[in-house]
Image: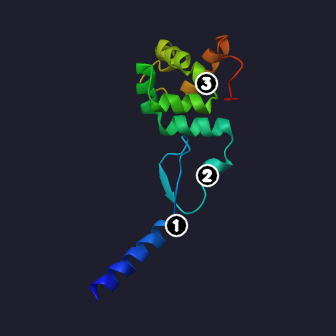
Amino acid sequence: MKLLLNAALITALGLTAGACTVVTDPSSGSSATTGGSSSAAFMNRPQQTAEFAKVNLERLRNDMAAGRGEYLASLAALLEIEPGRQPAFFAFTQDKFAVLFPNDRTTATEMLATLDRELRADPRFGQRLTLN
């Protein structure tokens, strides 16, 4: 009887786990969802970038201050910075940190607008932006 109950439990768990999907989009606020579709699928790249920055602002602030990190790498990917140019982008955000975050109340929208302006002014990045 115990063997039969264990088999039924394993089968039920297997069916339940099959209903979950994993989201690997760096713009999502969480790493998993159950059923349904991600709203990120309906966002264009600038909207995804804005949402990602809003949800992860403190992590981005920390990564930019350090000049490295997974959230900064995700932002670079959303901005379509080629992998070979990402180290320069990381150094750029670290160098521009005080401009990007002039105070503790800087919002994601303000930081992205400043980042957009600063990147456009830099010949290494000016042609590859997707914020607008």
Visual colour scheme? rainbow
Mark 1 → mark 2, Cα distance in angstroms: 18 Å
The location of residue 35, given as percent across then percent down, is 55, 63
Which residue, given by chain and number where applicable, does mark 2 sit on? 39
Residue 86 visible, this angle: yes
Q: Neighbour class for label 1 at 10 Å: few (<14), some, many (≥20)?
A: few
Front residue of 5 and 41: 5
Q: Secondary structure at mark 3?
A: helix
| 111 horizontally vs 105: left or right | right
Which residue, given by chain and number where applicable, does mark 1 sit on? 19
Residue 107 visible, this angle: no
Badge 2 amino acid: Ser
| 84 horizontally vs 95: left or right | right
Residue lying at 55% horizontally and 15% vertically, measured from the top left: 88
Please tell me whether mark 2 or mark 3 is closer to you in this view: 2
The answer to whether the residue labelled 1 contacts the one labelled 2, judged by CB atoms less than 8 Å apart, is: no
Please tell me whether mark 3 or mark 1 is closer to you in this view: 1
